[in-house]
């Protein structure tokens, strides 16, 4: 994950100019994060296993993680894998409020109104706050985070999110000592989100994190990607991104963030408790009851690649689960 010094995204630049500028900044970010890791006495992530060769694929140029700065012209994650492009990221979406067909979501969500939009932060906090999106953009520095997104359905992408650490917003609210979990809720408005008329699911979409997970620096609230504001299909105007967990934890179009004492339920736990647990950490060793989680299809690639424990973020987050049985707590 590369963290990049704060940049102004106000100026509109043509995509190509913007992308060139990004490449420079990604290089700078990679160098900075290597320094930060060294300063904390943490080893940079170990080389990840090569993609599965079971499918008979020849080794791709990205098969071996490259810890050096990205080559000129390359835009990659910290493992050396290229970013998915804007078209891929915004035209292949899971957002059941609009459709269960990934390639229809963008079109069906196109007119979803993003203003006015308020997000309430409440529950067991000292300072309950209701933000509108302008307040949020003013209150928190927006930075870029390049993360892998690994859907529980075994496809993945690399996405350059814009956002800020969830922990900063929670700290501003001041969790009380009995707050142990965070519960998130998507807008509930069946007139605007036609999928919510389906009785298959317990709308609104909700998700949850343990408070220490939520405070981990990798967990962000995202307002954009590729330097642009989020489009509706990506969960505008504000969505969670928790890169070490299956994609369904990264709840979209959030209107409420609540600190609570008990582990909250989620829409997916309600829908199929034997298939979707509360933790949902990416784990190649624990299969979904209906398919293997050992490998995945990176959108834009042929064949499959190995799925990494915690989606490649084990160095940063495995410690959150010390002593836990990750088969039981799937
Ligand atoms: N409110 C809401 N959030 C959601 C979903 C959804 O259907 N509704 N789908 C989840 C799933 S399964 C995934 S994989 C990611 C997909 O995010 P993307 O479309 O931006 O790639 O969003 C997650 N967040
Ligand atoms: Mo997903």
Image (cartoon, rainbow, N blue to C red):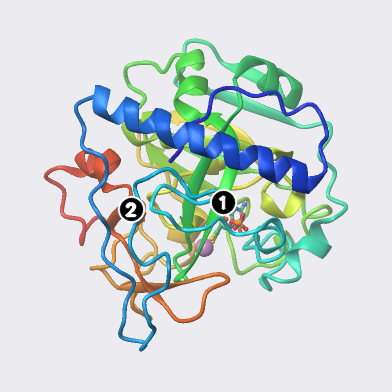
The residue indicated by pointer 1 is 159
Quarter where residue 240 is shown: top right
Q: In this view, does 115 lie above or below 289?
A: above
Query: Is residue 224 something one can see in this rendering?
Result: no
Residue 181 x/y as whole percent? 38, 34
For residue 184, side relative to residue 59 (left or right): right
Query: Is residue 107 something one can see in this rendering?
Result: yes
- Check mark 1 vs ligand 1: CB closer than 8 Å? yes or no: yes
Neighbour tally class for label 1: few under 14, some 14-19, many 20 plus, Cα within 10 Å: many
Q: In this view, does 284 lie above or below 80?
A: below
Residue 38 x/y as whole percent? 25, 28
If you read the primary sequence from the N terminus, does the residue marked by circle 2 or circle 1 appear first?
A: 1
| Closer to us: 177 or 77 | 77
Q: In this view, does 175 lie above or below 232?
A: above
Is the N terminus in the top left, top right, bottom left or bottom right quadrant?
Answer: top left
Q: Give yes or no for contact between labels 2 and 1 (Cβ–Cβ under 8 Å).
A: no
The residue indicated by pointer 2 is 312
| Closer to us: 165 or 99 | 165
Please state the quadrant of the image where ligand 1 appears: bottom right
Q: In this view, does 319 lie above or below 147?
A: above
For residue 194, side relative to residue 126 (left or right): right
Q: Distance between the residues labelled 2 and 1?
A: 14 Å
For residue 13, side relative to residue 100 (left or right): right
| Residue at far right of view | 111
Residue 39 x/y as whole percent? 26, 22
Residue 51 x/y as whole percent? 34, 71
Mark 1: secondary structure: strand
Q: Residue at x 60, y 19 (%)?
A: 140
Q: Which residue is drawn at 52% across and 48% down?
A: 250
| Closer to us: 173 or 179 | 173
């Amino acid at each position: 994950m590369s963290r990049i010094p704060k940049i102004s995204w106000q100026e509109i630049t043509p995509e190509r100019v913007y992308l060139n500028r990004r490449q420079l900044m990604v290089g700078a970010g990679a160098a900075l994060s290597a320094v930060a890791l060294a300063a904390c006495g943490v080893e940079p992530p170990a080389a990840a296993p090569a993609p599965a060769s079971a499918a008979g694929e020849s080794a791709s140029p990205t098969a071996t993680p490259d810890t050096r700065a990205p080559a000129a012209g390359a835009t990659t994650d910290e493992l050396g894998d290229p970013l998915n492009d804007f078209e891929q990221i915004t035209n292949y979406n899971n957002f059941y409020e609009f459709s269960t067909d990934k390639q229809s979501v963008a079109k069906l969500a196109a007119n979803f109104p993003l203003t006015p939009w308020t997000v309430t932060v409440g529950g067991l906090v000292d300072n309950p706050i209701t933000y509108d999106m302008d307040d949020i953009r003013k209150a928190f520095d927006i930075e870029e985070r390049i993360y892998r997104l690994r859907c529980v359905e075994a496809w993945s992408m690399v996405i350059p999110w814009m956002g800020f650490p969830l922990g900063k917003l929670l700290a501003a609210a001041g969790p009380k000592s009995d707050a142990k979990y965070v519960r998130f809720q998507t807008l509930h408005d069946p007139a605007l989100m036609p999928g919510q008329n389906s009785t298959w699911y317990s709308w609104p979409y909700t998700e949850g994190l343990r408070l220490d997970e939520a405070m981990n620096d990798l967990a962000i609230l995202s307002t954009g990607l590729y330097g642009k504001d989020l489009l509706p299909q990506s969960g505008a105007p504000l969505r969670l991104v928790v890169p070490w967990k299956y994609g369904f934890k990264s709840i979209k179009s959030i209107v409420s963030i609540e600190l609570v004492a008990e582990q909250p339920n989620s829409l997916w736990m309600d829908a199929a408790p034997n298939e979707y647990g509360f933790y949902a950490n990416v784990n190649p060793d624990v299969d979904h009851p209906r398919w293997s989680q050992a490998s995945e299809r990176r959108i834009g690639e042929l064949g499959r690649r190995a799925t990494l424990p915690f989606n490649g973020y084990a160095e940063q987050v495995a410690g959150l689960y010390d002593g836990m049985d990750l088969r039981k707590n799937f």
